[in-house]
Amino acid sequence: MAYRRTPAVQERLDAQRARLLDAATTAVATHGYAGCSIAAVAKNAGVATGTLYRHFDGKGELFAEVFQSVCSREVSAARDAGDNARSLEGNHRSAVSASVRTFAERAMRAPVLAYALLVEPVDPLVDEQRLMFRESFRDCLATAIRSAVDTGEIPSQDATLTAACIVGAIGEALILPLRGGTTDPAAIDAILAFTLRSLGSFDDTHA
């Protein structure tokens, strides 16, 4: 007869897994991906290293899940900011601006984590999540750009391509500040001005 986990056992395992993911997220936010180790994550989660391997095959699988969770959170924050701006200001250009501003501000508040998410060399499993993150953020912006085109707010364009260019430019603009662990509010204003110019607007002020 196959062993069946009791609800109490499953609850304990789920709690262990959650602690491990929390510890891994804290580790990458503090030390970057290269500075994280399986042993340190297990210790900070209050479990033995062998216990971690019962949940994850290795560092790649563990941090792939961490990246998936964190990236989803960041895209959701950007999307929510865009939705709120659209509701308040009644246009889709403001949604693009709000999403970009939110992403850049959150990155600068957590530079080590943002650098790891965007550019730090990682395992292939983790890099796959990074690509999915870029696609998700691109699609978030593309939806607002497409709507702005449909309502005549900006010129006709390939919304997906424009969004991809904006995402790439944001990452490139943030690399050096994030690597140095610095914050520069002026950089956010410059990124927003670039974003609006990319949409085909001659107005460099914030929507």
Image: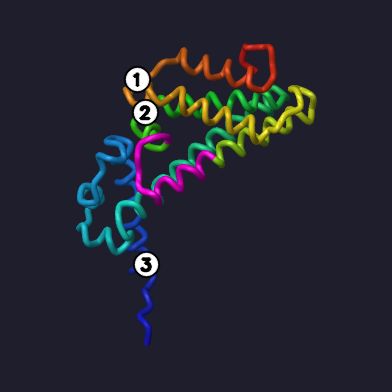
First of labels 1, 3 by sequence position: 3
- State the image quarter where residue 67 is shown: top left
User: Which residue type does callout 1 highlight?
Assistant: Thr
User: Which residue type does callout 2 highlight?
Assistant: Pro
Location of the C terminus by quadrant is top right
- The residue at which mark 2 appears reads as 111
Q: In this view, does 190 lie above or below 115?
A: above
Residues at badges 3 and 2 in contact (C-beta under 8 Å)? Answer: no
The CA distance from mark 2 to mark 1 is 7 Å
- Residue 26, horizontal then vertical, whole percent: 31, 40
Location of the N terminus by quadrant is bottom left
- Residue 191, horizontal then vertical, whole percent: 53, 19
Residue at x-position 55% and y-position 26% = 100
Q: Which is nearer the eye, 81 or 194?
A: 194
Residue at x-position 70% and y-position 33% = 158
Q: Give the magenta range.
A: 118-134
- The residue at which mark 3 appears reads as 10
The CA distance from mark 1 to mark 3 is 43 Å
Q: Which mark is residue 182?
A: 1
- Disc 2 element: helix
Magenta stretch, main secondary structure class:
helix
